[in-house]
Amino acid sequence: MTATVAVGFDRTPSGEYALHVAAREAHDRGGSLVVTTAYHWLTPPGPGSQSFADTEAATRKAAEEIAEYGAGRIRRLYPDLPVEPHAVPGYAGKVLAEAGHTADLLVVGNRGAGGFQGLQLGSTSLRTLAGSCCPVIVVRGNAVDVHQRIVAAVDIDENCDTVLDFAFDEATRRKAGLTVTHIWDEPWLVPYEQQDPGIAEDITRIELEREDRLATLVDSAEARHPAIRPFHQIGTGSTAGLLVDASQHADLLVTGAHRNAEGQHGMLLGPVTQALLHHAHCPIAVVPLN
């Protein structure tokens, strides 16, 4: 079955970066690419201005030209990749989330206020994630630094198979190394270990138990994806802080998010995921958890 990758495109640096990430994903998956540009228009302010129909037509035409421009760029780079431009009326967050309902992967840009790459994630990207049903890659950082490394952040207390499978698949396609990491984010015992040797023993026991559980999960995923030999590790401290640091040396950071209530589209973005989306140094893939 052919994979479909959808991308939200506008003619900004962030939109261009997202377009190229999406095209590479579609090409490497042997799939197709849908270039989506959202548009909406304002009601004409008064007499003498364009009619409602004229305003809608002009806005739609501009969006169609933007989508076709993006599609044309990719056709020249990947002549054999099926590419479809779509101009869709509506607000961007909702339009892109709906595009993800029929896609296997959705790629969106990271554009905060003013469009500067270093600023926090824009509201459109957050709304897209909140309404998406498929994995979403939010592009961050830049396309210059290449590390040949993917980092998968997993919670061993959850069913994280979808996160691991996505990360292993990406590492296989990119021929990249894979690090699977679990952060023990309850280090409140640590300051007391010097005072009570029993607490130090508890910490060691907990870390060994978590290491065993993580190793079991990674071994199971490796059996499903034998081409990859991953490295795995346990960290202790601030989950968001440690993962943001790890993203400085990765090409992609993969994490998971719970789905919304049954029968509803979208994902619930926890505080760690939101922190990564705002501060990571590389693209973030958010994968719905089963």
Image (cartoon, rainbow, N blue to C red):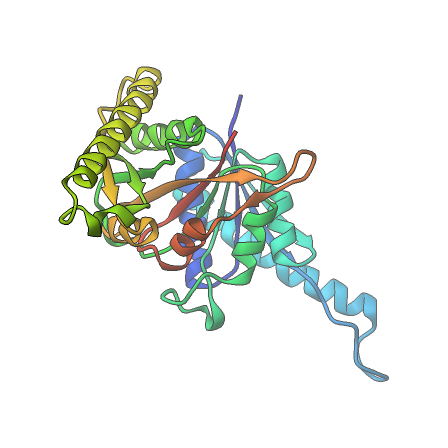
Q: Residue at x 40, y 69 (%)?
A: 116
Give the quarter of the image for residue 100: top right
Image height of 240 relative to 103, above or below: below
Image height of 289 relative to 13, above or below: above
Image mark count = 0
Q: Can residue 176 be seen in this view?
A: no
Horizontal and vertical percent for residue 23? Answer: 43, 42
Q: Relative to residue 23, is residue 176 drawn left or right?
A: left
Q: Which residue is drawn at 23% across and 34% down?
A: 207
Horizontal and vertical percent for residue 73? Answer: 45, 50
Q: Relative to residue 157, is residue 261 drawn left or right?
A: right
Q: Relative to residue 148, is residue 112 drawn left or right?
A: right
Q: Residue at x 35, y 17 (%)?
A: 224
Horizontal and vertical percent for residue 179? Answer: 25, 35
Give the quarter of the image for residue 16: bottom left
Q: Which one is nearer the viewer's eye here, 119 or 82?
A: 119
Image height of 243 relative to 227, above or below: below
Q: Which one is nearer the viewer's eye here, 94 or 38?
A: 94
Horizontal and vertical percent for residue 212? Answer: 25, 24
Q: Can residue 235 be seen in this view?
A: yes
Give the quarter of the image for residue 196: top left
Q: Residue at x 41, y 50 (%)?
A: 272
